[in-house]
Amino acid sequence: MTLILQVPNEYGYVLVAASSSLLVNVLHFFLSAKARRASGLKYPIPYASEEQAAKDPKAYSFNCAQRAHGNFVENQTPFLAGLLIAGLHYPTAAASLGAAWVAARAAYAVGYAKRGPQGRLGGFFVASLSDLALKGLALWTSVQFAMAASA
């Protein structure tokens, strides 16, 4: 049996949410670069040492910006997979959840870079909830495709 995949008319909204996540990565780049410059840490040093961060608030801020960026990179690919799969059957819901995730991840980035680990919490909770919902929709979409293929 052949599966013909047609995307819904509203799938463009899903692609807008996916594309906007790329801009959050750019935001992280600027936050990390600004913090690196302020800290005086040169490339290729990925993080200030624990001793440096304890003595210098600018080095600590650089570590926070770097960690926020690392966390974003760790989470973007699974987010995109969930978004793109869920959008095949639920484009409006997926795009809405995707937009919430993107906005929350931007808040996470700025909060972590400016206020440290506590500053990330608001963005973390909203991003986590929207990501979990997207993953559930993606799983359900996958089950629907599998059931249709076996029918």
Image: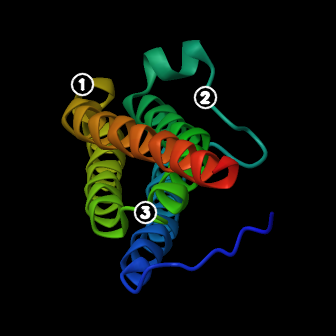
Which residue is at a point 26% across and 62% down the rendered structure image?
A: 96
Above or below, 124 against 117 in this view is below
Foreground mark, 1 or 3, reads 3
Check disc 1 and give the amino acid type: Gln
Residue 89 numbered tag? 3
Element on which disc 1 rests: helix
Labelled pair 1, 2 in contact (Cβ < 8 Å): no
Check disc 2 and give the amino acid type: Ala
Residue 48 numbered tag? 2
Whole-percent x, y for residue 76 in the image? 55, 50
Q: CA distance from mark 2 to mark 3?
A: 45 Å
Looking at the rendered structure, the number of numbered marks drawn on it comes to: 3
Q: Quadrant of residue 49?
A: top right
Counting residues from the N terminus, which is met first, the one under dot 2 or under dot 3?
2
Foreground mark, 1 or 2, reads 1
Element on which disc 2 rests: loop
Which residue is at a point 45% across and 15% down the rendered structure image?
A: 54
Which residue is at a point 81% across and 63% down the rendered structure image?
A: 1
Above or below, 149 against 4 in this view is above
Q: CA distance from mark 1 to mark 3?
A: 37 Å
Q: Quadrant of residue 120?
A: top left
Element on which disc 3 rests: loop
Counting residues from the N terminus, which is met first, the one under dot 1 or under dot 3?
3
Residue 60 is left or right of residue 33, and the answer is: left
Q: How many C-alpha atoms fall within 10 Å of the one at disc 2: few (<14), some, or many (≥20)?
A: many
Above or below, 33 against 140 in this view is below
Check disc 3 and give the amino acid type: His
Labelled pair 2, 3 in contact (Cβ < 8 Å): no
